[in-house]
């Protein structure tokens, strides 16, 4: 079984920065891609960013483009999300996810493994 463990959430004022990390453990695992999603109270889980594991290509939601950066270290099975210029609307629980096979990066249903989530709160 594969486990994903996120860390790095917290509270920050608008304009601040946070870095989230996600480490995978368990059986040997080489995903097709890994992504970050977020879910605010009363809202559906939404795509934030994704990185392909072999080529390192990255894609972002329009709402975070230019402010967030996703990166990965395939040797360490770790992915990060650098979040800059945070806004109150970025407040949510952030989830790391991994997909075994390629497909639509934006759909949560395409991912096979999920972390437990980490809270990010941005105050104005």
Image: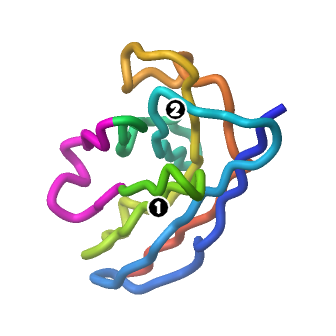
Q: Percent position (x, y) of residue 119?
A: 62, 64
Q: Looking at the image, is 119 positioned above or below residue 5?
A: below
Asked if the magenta segment contains residue 59, the reply would be: yes
Residue at figure coordinates x 51%, y 16% from the top left: 101
x%, y% of residue 84? 29, 74
Report the magenta stretch's main SS: loop
User: How many numbered marks does the figure carry?
Assistant: 2
Residue 10 seen: yes
Rate crowding at label 1 as few (under 14), some (14 to 19) or many (20 or more) other CA atoms within 10 Å.
Answer: many
**Up/down of 7 relative to 50, above or below:** below
Looking at the image, is 64 positioned above or below residue 47? below
Q: Earlier in the sequence, mark 2 or mark 1?
A: 2
Q: Nearer the viewer, residue 41 or 106?
A: 106
In this picture, residue 115 sits left or right of residue 123: right
Image coords of residue 20 (percent x, y) = 52, 66
Q: Nearer the viewer, residue 33 or 88?
A: 33
Q: Nearer the viewer, residue 31 or 39?
A: 31
SS class, disc 1: strand
Q: CA distance from mark 2 to mark 1?
A: 22 Å
Residue picked out by circle 2: 44
Q: Quadrant of the N terminus?
A: top right
Occupied quadrant, residue 93:
bottom right
Residue at figure coordinates x 43%, y 54% from the top left: 72
Q: Is residue 97 left or right of residue 102?
A: right
Q: Is residue 39 above or below residue 69?
A: above
Mark 1, residue position: 80
Mark 2, residues whose alpha carbon is within 10 Å: few (<14), some, or many (≥20)?
few
The part of the chain drawn in magenta is 55-70
Q: Which type of secondary structure does the marked residue at label 2 adopt?
A: loop
């Amino acid at each position: 079984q594969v486990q994903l463990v996120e860390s790095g959430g917290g509270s920050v004022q608008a304009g601040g920065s946070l870095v989230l990390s996600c480490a995978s453990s368990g059986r040997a695992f080489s995903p097709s891609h890994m992504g970050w999603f977020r879910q605010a109270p009363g809202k559906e889980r939404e795509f934030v960013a994704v990185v392909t594991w072999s080529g390192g290509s990255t894609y972002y939601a329009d709402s975070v483009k230019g402010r967030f950066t996703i990166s990965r270290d395939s040797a360490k099975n770790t992915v990060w999300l650098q979040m800059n210029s945070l806004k109150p609307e970025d407040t949510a629980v952030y989830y790391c996810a991994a997909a075994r096979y390629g497909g639509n990066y934006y759909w949560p249903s395409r991912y096979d493994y999920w972390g437990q989530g980490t809270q990010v709160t941005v105050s104005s």
